[in-house]
Image: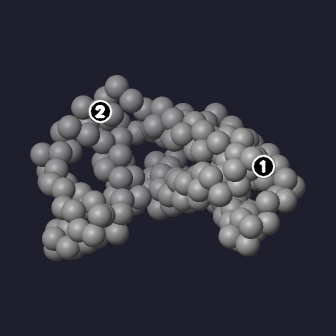
Amino acid sequence: MTTHTSKQQRCYSFDAANLARIQEITDSNTLSHYFEADHKRLDLFAEQFSHYLMILPQLASRYFTAFAQGLTAHIVAEETVLFPFFEEKTGLQQGPTVTMRQEHQQIITILSLISEKLAQQHYQIAAEYNQLNQLLARHNKREENILYPMLDQHSNDQEKAELFLKLFEATALPHCGPCAAN
């Protein structure tokens, strides 16, 4: 893997040799493990946001921004990489991904509403935040109990390695400098 830095942004370009390393990583990890760990990472940002909201609202806003950006990247990865793969492998175009996409839209709407309020320094967002938490709890449970295990069942090690690479590319920083040529 080569790394290029420009204007404090990091870009990565992969060559074929890196696929073997990714395969090595995925041999011991499942898609379930990866995405459940990401859920936990996002939960930590949300917990910090909730903790600091009334005592240090500016810090809380920064945690919410990290949470919202991370959750948006998570959703993009699922909708552009995971869901199409799931639908192709299972033949379930009208299955659980339909509901999950609808929930993603609801999540994005609530995230935007909260972000707008925080930008205006309106910190009375309990109703919206509770709605978001309830939606995420149901949504994550469905993903962790249905979608991710089915993906693990329907994918071999090579497919998992390729999915991890696609997931990285789907959520990587925008291309900069020399990366754009690769």
Foreground label between 2 and 1: 1
Q: Is 87 placed left or right of 180 in the picture?
A: right
Residue 112 picture quarter: bottom right
State the residue lying farthest toward the right: 127
**Depth check, front residue: 80 or 97:** 80
* Residue indicated by mark 1: 54
Residue at the disc numbered 2: 25
Q: Quadrant of the C terminus?
A: bottom left
Which residue is at a point 35% across and 46% down the rendered structure image? 164
The answer to whether residue 72 is visible is yes
Q: Residue at x 15, y 54 (%)?
A: 2
- Amino acid type for the residue under numbered disc 1: Met
Q: What is the crowding at mark 2: few (fewer than 14 residues within 10 Å), some, or many (at least 20)?
A: some
Residue furthest front in the image: 55
Q: Earlier in the sequence, mark 2 or mark 1?
A: 2
User: Which residue is located at x 27 percent, y 70 percent?
Assistant: 7
Residue situated in front as seen by the camera: 135 or 64: 64
Q: Amino acid at mark 2?
A: Ile
Q: Position of residue 119 (x, y in %)?
A: 68, 70
- Secondary structure of the residue carrying tag 1 is loop
Label 2 to label 1, Cα distance in Å? 41 Å
The spot of residue 81 in percent (x, y) is: 44, 56
Label 2, secondary structure: give it: helix
